[in-house]
Amino acid sequence: MACVWRRRQVILIVILLCVSTLIATRLFTQPAGVTPTQGLWHIFYLPTIGVQVMMSAILLLIGGRTVSAERRRQTWDHLRVTTTGAEQLLRVRLLAVFYRVRILFALAYAARFAILVTTLIEFSSYGGEYLTRLLSHAQGGPVSPLVGGVIVAAALTAAFLLPLTQSALDVALSLLLTTAIPNYPWSVMGQMVLVTVRVVSTIALSILGLLILQGGLPNLPAPLAWISVLGAVVMGDQGLLMMQISQSDVVWEKLPYGILIGGAALLLTLMQAAFASLVMALAVRRAERTE
């Protein structure tokens, strides 16, 4: 059964890759991007988002099954009365859930490494002055290469951390929901609501990221525009938009002080990690509480 599910995942990802290639090249009538590195990013963008959506849905669905399975085996109460039984169970299951989606994790990070390589290649363009040229277009005034390099590094770091922090939050939310709702049918319904909200919000924010990709930001006040872009970067494509420098330059140029988006994304990523830890602690506390 597991092999069949993995095969279906691979087939779906291949389909997404083919569709993305057709869209990026307009049915093979034009290059996927102005530069080969930009073209590769265009091709990988949609399939990687598809991988991340599947990963979130799976984690939300199977994360909470741990408690439900123990309840059906009538071992849950025995675990809860021990000193650290419930906590150990939830944390072990957290790692087990990550292991079950290891292929999706590998694909998400393979795309990121490929984009990172192309980004580093772009840095060497124009005699190493490519980043300096882009920074000169940033709103709020020209930015020094040193500051720009630090902020770009922050954006790249956030892009590599976000799949981990988002996945940890998904599993923690699923575990908290299951421990808080003992009734199995209601617990399953709650999980389905979580999956629906997560998938819909990810797709909506990713579409916003595609609008940014096309060079169009909503006609919103600067604070709302900032929130929209951060949502697209952190909760939508999980940092993919900011990994391709020629694409993130659109944000730098259109959004006031948009160059700071990378640092803000890293800060939100760290806050997301802390929040996931807090939600996990709440799930453990709720699991240990006498029902």
Image (cartoon, grey):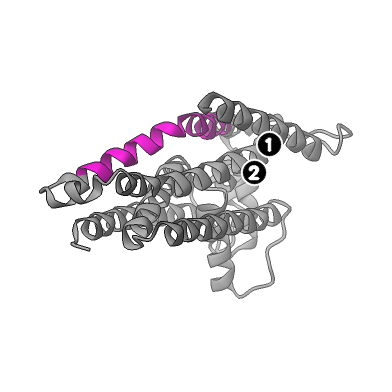
Q: Position of residue 211 (x, y in %)?
A: 70, 56
Q: State which tag comes first along the sequence, 1 or 2.
A: 1
- Viewed as shown, does residue 16 lie left or right of 280? right
Q: Type of residue at label 2?
A: Ser
- Residue 261 seen in the current view: yes
User: In which image quadrant can residue 289 be found?
Assistant: bottom left
Q: Going 57% across and 60% down the picture, which residue do you hit?
A: 229
Amino acid type assigned to the residue bearing label 1 in the image? Gln
Q: CA distance from mark 1 to mark 2?
A: 7 Å
| Residue 38: numbered disc | 1
Viewer-side residue, 127 vs 80: 80
The answer to which quarter of the image holds residue 114 is top right
Q: What percent of the width, then of the height, locates residue 185?
A: 45, 58
The magenta stretch is 88-116
Q: Is residue 33 visible?
A: no
- Residue 27 is situated, as x and y percent measured from the top left of the image, at 87, 35
- Residue marked by disc 2: 246
